Image (tube, helix red, strand yellow):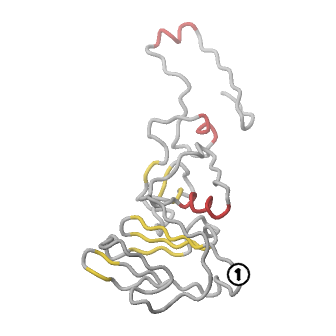
Amino acid sequence: MFYYRTVNGLQPPIKVMTLGRILVKKWIHLSVQVHHSRISFFLNGWEDDNTPFDSRILVGTVADTDGTLQIGQSFTGLEQFVGRMQDFRFYPVALTNRDILEVFSGKFPHLHTQSECRCPGSHPRVHPLIQRYCIPNGADDTTNDRVLRLDAEAHPLYYINDDDIGTTWISSVFANTAGLDHGVSITIDLQNGQYQVM
């Protein structure tokens, strides 16, 4: 259960049913991702479709009224957790789904185009079909609520074969057409395959 307060006081707890996912005498990596009024729960990294185990909308943003935090019990001290906890961490910003998998596995998930570019906290999941976009947790794959993971003016080499006809790759821009009168020399040395130029 996740108990929290907003500016309007204590809110009903968020209950997540794990049904056989948390076993007795077995370590579990639990990540709770909170960004504004959205909360997501991850058990041992992410699910097979790169999503959290569960994602919900909170009544409002979490209010830190007195700096008190209780872990493993309710606000009243009841419902105490029975078990062991190790390596408890807080981060100053909400980690993205890929960041959470890196904390769990020790490996940052690779993407075809600009893998080092991360999603913003508001849209922490890489779109499963169009990797240049990020979407919120809990949103369908077809959602229009998406933001660019890469700069709109970026044209990296990887766009040449990203299987998305909506992307373009710009190798050079001529100031005027006079540059074309001298001919164009194309040299292609691609790091990830052979391609035919037409």
Residue visible at 43% across and 75% down in the picture: 56
Residue visible at 25% across and 74% down in the picture: 7
Residue 4: x and y, percent? 37, 78
Residue visible at 64% across and 76% down in the picture: 28
Q: Amino acid at mark 1?
A: Lys
Residue 26: x and y, percent? 70, 81
Residue 60: x and y, percent? 31, 73
The foreground one among 38 and 89 is 89
Would you place residue 183 above or below residue 26 in this image? above
The image quadrant of residue 76 is bottom left
* Placement of the C terminus among the 4 image quadrants: top right
| Residue at the left extreme of this rendering | 8
How many discs appear? 1
Q: Is residue 119 left or right of residue 104?
A: left
The foreground one among 105 and 87 is 87
Q: Is residue 58 left or right of residue 165?
A: left
Residue 98: x and y, percent? 58, 58
What residue is shown with label 1?
26
The foreground one among 38 and 170 is 38
Would you place residue 151 above or below residue 190 in this image? below
The image quadrant of residue 51 is bottom right
Q: Is residue 197 left or right of residue 149?
A: right
SS state under label 1: loop
The foreground one among 76 and 62 is 76
